[in-house]
Image (cartoon, helix red, strand yellow):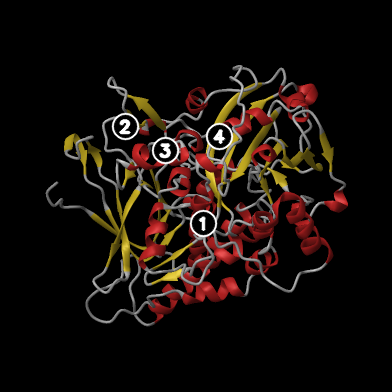
């Protein structure tokens, strides 16, 4: 394509992603601006989903610590935290039919949920979006941030939103609309786990040079409406063991009783799994057949489905948080506390801390004579500090750092020692005394996969019955996933020959199984040869392929804004 003239817009702050981190940052900045008589300080949030909350997927049990700080009167203001946790149970599934409940005293304290709420994070985020707009934050849903823009000196200038109306051949169609350039003094990246721009920024500025490798899981979730006689609002259940134990894989599951006779349930499979035949989606389907889980679902109806990668490296894997002109917040940095299986309150707090740093830097620049509601000047004196190191200082002095540091050994212990010994280690570390050392997990998740030659066990996955267990295509249908069909594939292969020539013989091309949406298939041509097919329209934006591909040959980039899932009440 020839060079395109683009319209640009200028703001004080641009935030990429209207999730809990991005919206909390926007709200905190505007709260401080109003309190300190800087009402013209402008904040813009871009969101690739068709609406705020469309791409939000989480368990979720919310620890209210951060929302208490951001909105002390959240109850009066109508925040959708309607179901306090009433019972908290942890189980180990010993086999496909047996289970054992863990005594409460044996469960690591990080897993206790007293004072927490069963929520739909999507609905909480929609509420945060309303509060942000009341504070005059400009929110642009349906606009995907496709590129980071830079000044000549390497400082981040802002972002470019994706072009609309590019055909599969890469050429503009009759519907072509060029993307916008959004310029700002500070650009905050809040894309969630494995953000595609965050990934580029970490590489460009070498932000992870002093960190352990990041680690991930794939979270697969369903929402059910169940028999009212079986519904217990506020009952929270967690567990581990079967069926993942059959393949020596680690992970866990949840089942939460929400409001309106609904339960949210799902499984997180650690992406450090070794068995190439393991099929995370089918593991979750098989898990539902266990009597402990099945008892709640029989007679019920599945109403929604989704999947999303989960960041779980914790404190040891945090990159440097700042770079000239911008910051990483939320799970773009990796603030989820895996010992709690919670990241919403930590994402919110990171956004709030960054928001404070942003406001203070802008206020200091204005005091020196700088202007509001425009981007960073390139001629004359730049009165606004380029790198927000005060964000890192605020993090280092916050409960967020203390919480993550205290849980730093949880994930590495499970990876190194397995669920039994690792669980015992974490019980001691969380409940008895803090061990005086730090465990490290230096093996990348994609490198953990064994070849088919080195793996004899192949799990047996029964055919879905369409009542309790389901296939991927019917699941994607109820995720409301839609993409413009005539657009370039957003799943890029560095070398198109690798799936068939390398991954298929070595690992039986695991993309066929690790993708929870059936995007990747090995097909047979008329002459008997194999080809790798990408059904990009099925993609639910989980990012698992970008993480787990053993050849690191797949790169996820953003499709047209507004595409992807549209999760209701998830």
Q: Residue at horizontal 68%, vertical 28%?
A: 288
Residue 393 in sight: yes
Name which of mark 2 and mark 3 comes first in the sequence. 2
Q: Residue at horizontal 76%, vertical 40%?
A: 236
Q: CA distance from mark 3 to mark 4?
A: 18 Å
Name which of mark 2 and mark 1 comes first in the sequence. 1
Element on which disc 2 rests: loop
Of badges 3 and 4, nearer the viewer stands: 3
Left or right of 108 in this view: 2: left
Q: Residues within 10 Å of mark 2 (few under 14, many from 20)?
A: some
Q: CA distance from mark 2 to mark 3?
A: 33 Å
Of badges 2 and 3, nearer the viewer stands: 3
Name which of mark 1 and mark 4 comes first in the sequence. 4
Q: CA distance from mark 1 to mark 4?
A: 19 Å
Label placed on residue 444: 1
Q: CA distance from mark 3 to mark 1?
A: 22 Å
Q: Label 2 belongs to which residue?
A: 484
Name which of mark 3 and mark 1 comes first in the sequence. 1
- Relative to 183, does residue 524 appear above or below in the rendering? above
Q: Residue at horizontal 59%, vertical 17%?
A: 466
């Amino acid at each position: 394509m020839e060079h395109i003239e683009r319209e640009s817009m200028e703001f004080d702050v641009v935030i990429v992603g209207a999730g809990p981190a991005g919206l909390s940052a926007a709200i905190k900045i505007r709260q401080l601006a109003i309190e300190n008589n800087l009402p013209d300080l402008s904040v813009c949030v871009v969101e690739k989903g068709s609406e705020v909350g469309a791409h939000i997927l989480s368990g979720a049990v919310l620890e209210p610590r951060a929302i208490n700080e951001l909105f002390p009167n959240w109850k009066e203001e109508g925040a959708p935290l309607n179901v306090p946790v009433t019972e908290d149970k942890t189980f180990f599934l010993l086999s496909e039919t047996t289970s054992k409940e863990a005594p409460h005293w044996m469960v690591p304290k990080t897993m206790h949920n007293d004072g927490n709420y069963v929520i739909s994070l999507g609905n909480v985020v929609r509420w945060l979006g309303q509060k942000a707009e009341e504070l005059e934050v400009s929110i642009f849903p349906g606009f995907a941030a496709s590129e980071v823009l830079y000044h000549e000196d390497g400082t981040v200038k802002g972002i470019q939103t994706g072009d609309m109306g590019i055909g599969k051949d890469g050429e503009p169609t009759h519907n072509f609309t060029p993307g916008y350039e959004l310029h700002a003094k500070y650009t905050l990246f809040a894309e969630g786990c494995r953000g595609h721009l965050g990934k580029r920024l970490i590489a460009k500025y070498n932000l992870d040079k002093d960190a352990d490798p990041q680690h991930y899981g794939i979270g697969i979730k369903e929402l059910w409406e169940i028999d009212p006689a079986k519904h217990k609002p506020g009952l929270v259940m967690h567990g581990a063991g079967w069926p993942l134990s059959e393949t020596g894989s680690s992970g866990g599951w949840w089942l939460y009783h929400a409001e309106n006779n609904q339960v949210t349930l799902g499984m997180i499979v650690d992406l450090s799994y070794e068995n190439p035949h393991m099929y995370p989606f089918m593991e979750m389907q098989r898990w539902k057949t266990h009597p402990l889980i099945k008892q709640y679902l029989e007679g019920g109806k599945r109403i929604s489905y989704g999947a999303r990668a989960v960041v779980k490296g914790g404190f040891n894997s945090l990159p440097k948080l700042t770079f000239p002109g911008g910051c990483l917040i939320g799970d773009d940095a990796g603030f989820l506390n895996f010992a709690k299986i919670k990241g919403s309150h930590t994402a919110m707090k990171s956004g709030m801390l960054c928001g404070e740093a942003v406001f203070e830097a802008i206020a200091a620049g204005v005091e020196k004579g700088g202007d509001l509601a425009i981007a960073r000047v390139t001629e004359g004196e730049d009165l606004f500090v380029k790198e927000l190191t005060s964000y890192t200082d605020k993090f280092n002095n916050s409960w967020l750092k203390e919480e993550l540091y205290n849980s730093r050994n949880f994930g590495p212990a499970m990876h190194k020692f397995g669920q039994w010994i690792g669980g015992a280690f974490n019980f001691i570390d969380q409940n008895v005394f803090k061990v005086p050392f730090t465990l490290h997990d230096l093996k990348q998740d994609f490198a953990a996969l064994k070849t088919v030659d080195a793996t004899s066990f192949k799990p047996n996955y029964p055919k879905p019955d369409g009542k309790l267990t389901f296939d991927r295509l019917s699941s994607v249908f109820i995720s409301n996933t839609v993409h413009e069909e005539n657009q370039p594939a957003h799943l890029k292969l560095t070398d198109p020959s690798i799936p068939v020539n390398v991954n298929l013989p070595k690992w039986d091309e695991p993309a066929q199984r690790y993708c929870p949406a059936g995007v990747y298939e090995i097909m047979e041509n008329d002459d008997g040869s194999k080809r790798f097919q990408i059904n990009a329209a099925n993609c639910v934006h989980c990012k698992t392929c970008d993480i787990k591909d053993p050849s690191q040959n797949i790169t996820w980039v953003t499709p047209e804004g507004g595409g992807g899932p549209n999760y209701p009440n998830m």
